[in-house]
Amino acid sequence: MLSKKILEALNKQVLMEAQSSQAYLGMASWAEIQPGLDGVAAFFFKHSDEERMHMLKLIHFINERGGFAVIPALQQPALTFVSLKKAFEELLKHELAVSESINDLVDISLQEKDYATHNFLQWYVMEQMEEEKLAMDCNAKLEMIGDDRSGLYLFDRDIMSMGAGGGRK
Ligand code: OFO
């Protein structure tokens, strides 16, 4: 059984994962209409799907433990980006905020002595570590590339093999 405090916090995380999925979908649609960013668009679409999977995993966990997962309304995400670098900066900022939220949730699970939820959340802790690293690597590479077109070409070609969209199961 979930305590009221844990239930609220888990439902807040459902919203966060849904908003992550929506934010990356916005980036994907933007990237898809940019010339030469097919690889990046595929990366964002895949990332968006993964965030939806994270949300679903939470929904099932909440409902299976006697709670009720609330399907939230979503804000419209950013639709355009001044550059690819800006989009990836946003992605990193977003992942850092999600990590903070997961850490808060872990903290609450310990305060509430809810060890089942604590155990369940470890998957998210590891996932966030991987996603933060990937976002930082992408930002570092884009920083190095700057406006170099051949660098951007290679970035777009290689992004799916940079550990992108691996996703923990
Ligand atoms: Fe849900 O994995 Fe990042 O945000």
Image: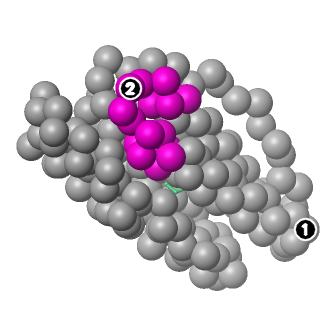
Q: Is residue 18 left or right of residue 142?
A: right
- Per the rendered image, the range of residues in magenta is 29-44
Q: Residue at x 32, y 62 (%)?
A: 162
Question: Along the horizontal axis of the image, is 117 left or right of 127?
Answer: right
Q: Which mark sits nearer the N-terminus, 1 or 2?
A: 2
SS under mark 1: loop
Point 39% across, 35% down: residue: 37
What's the residue type where badge 2 is placed?
Pro
Which secondary structure, mark 2? loop
The disc at residue 35 is: 2
Three-letter code, disc 1: Gly
* Left-right relation of 109 to 41: right
Q: Nearer the viewer, residue 162 or 114?
A: 162
Q: Decide: is 134 above or below 44.
A: below
The quadrant in which residue 99 appears is: bottom left
**Dot 1, crowdedness within 10 Å: few (<14), some or many (≥20)?**
few
Q: CA distance from mark 1 to mark 2?
A: 49 Å
Residue 34: percent from left, percent from top: 41, 24
Cβ of mark 2 under 8 Å from ligand 1: the answer is no
Instruction: Give the prevailing secondary structure in the magenta stretch.
Output: helix
Please give the name of the residue rendered at 75% of the width and 58% of the height, measured from the top-left corner.
56
